[in-house]
Amino acid sequence: MTAKENQATELDFSASSSDVDYPPPDDLFRALASSERRRLLAALPAESAMTLDELTDILVGWQSTTDGPAGPDEWAKVKIELVHAHLPLLADAGLVTYEDEEIARTTYPEPIEELVAFAGEYDSAVAETELA
Amino acid sequence: MSFGRILSDVASRQKQVIVYAPDDSGSELADVLATRNLTVDHRQLPAISSEAFVIVRDNGEFQGALSLADLLSFLTPPIRRPEDLDSLARKHRIVYELLDDTVFVSLDRRQLLATSRELEDRAWRTGHGRLHAGFQRADAFEAQRTVYQELSTTDIDIHLYVPGGVTGDPLTDTPLTLHTGNGERDRYWFILFDDGDSGAQNCALIARETDGGRYRGLWTYNEALVEEAFKAVSSYDS
């Protein structure tokens, strides 16, 4: 790898230093290692919080665009997975806050913001390729 | 219970349809669903996310989710019964349960004819049970006469409601019961079918003409509602 290419992915932690929390790498990549969780991050608006039920609606609805109609059983299953698996992992990585059944995105340091955005774009590019 | 009462009862059940879309797709849904018993809300999805989908809630409880494309194709007449929809039967049953008794649609005459034909075909294939069909005008019946003459060769007990009676051949040799001068019933276009068996083939269509050649009404495969519709037909005779 040349020095120039390397520069494009270079992370500069010095500017943010002590006042920004970077998640441990394993927590961060575990959090992103599931299409459900990446969808969740893509669906969460940057500014406002969402209720657990709304978020469940969106994930079930999104799934229905590829898998066909979904009923209350699927909905309950997705909600349970959110509460017991996905949200704790995302909260541990510092990517969302989850209190009183309200979920919100945290403010990400720039490199994390870029990583999450890239993950979303990568998913949608792959999905489009599969459709084509 | 009258037809009017059935329509207003069904219309009073509140369902909420939420359209999630990254753009303004689905904006036509409120017109398609002729919104008397549905509220249609729109919410924006982030651009890089899903294609449009629809969530249905009944008194706040989640009922189902499906893509907007699936919903629109399901609502395109002739309205099909879910088990006719091949391999996706189970999934489409969810759509059907979602919208059964609910679809209070606005249809034009051509669409209503297509839907009527679907119900008549169902009766023909079943070959037994009872079928009550109401025509608003004698000429409307004449256009369908051959269909009902063919149906009369089956074991189905057929009752036709034609205001003022038929204008063509009087049907005296045809094994069916003709009702003329039917009062309020004459304002409705209806087809009710009960298979006289498991009820799996039961279906009903009740519609009333509004302005400009459009009809408002419901179609259902719900056995209880089909039963109510049969009671409504006979209640006009008492």
Image (cartoon, coloured by chain):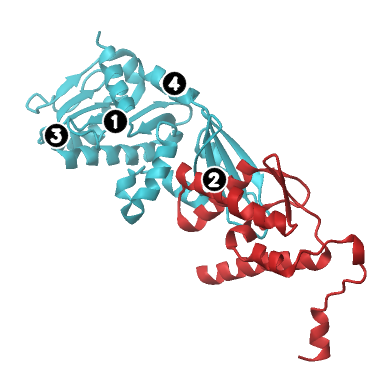
Q: Position of residue B189 (x, y in %)?
A: 33, 27
Chain letter, disc 4 residue: B
Give the foreground label among 4 and 1.
4
Q: Position of residue B184 (x, y in %)?
A: 34, 14
Residue sticking out furthest to the left: B173
Give the foreground label among 1 and 2.
2
Question: According to the image, label 3 marks what residue?
Answer: B128
Q: Secondary structure at mark 3?
A: loop
For image coordinates 29% across by 30% down, the residue present is B140
Q: Secondary structure at mark 4?
A: helix
Give the distance between the C-alpha atoms of the residues marked 2 and 4, in whole angstroms.
Answer: 24 Å
Looking at the picture, tell me which residue is in the foreground, A86 or A7. A86
Identify the amino acid type marked 4.
Asp
Q: Quadrant of residue B119?
A: top left
Q: Colour of chain A?
A: red
Identify the amino acid type marked 3.
His
Looking at the picture, tell me which residue is in the foreground, B56 or A116. A116
Q: Which mark sits nearer the N-terminus, 2 or 3? A: 2
For image coordinates 56% across by 67% down, the residue present is A127
The chain shown in cyan is which? B
Height in image: B191 above or below A115?
above
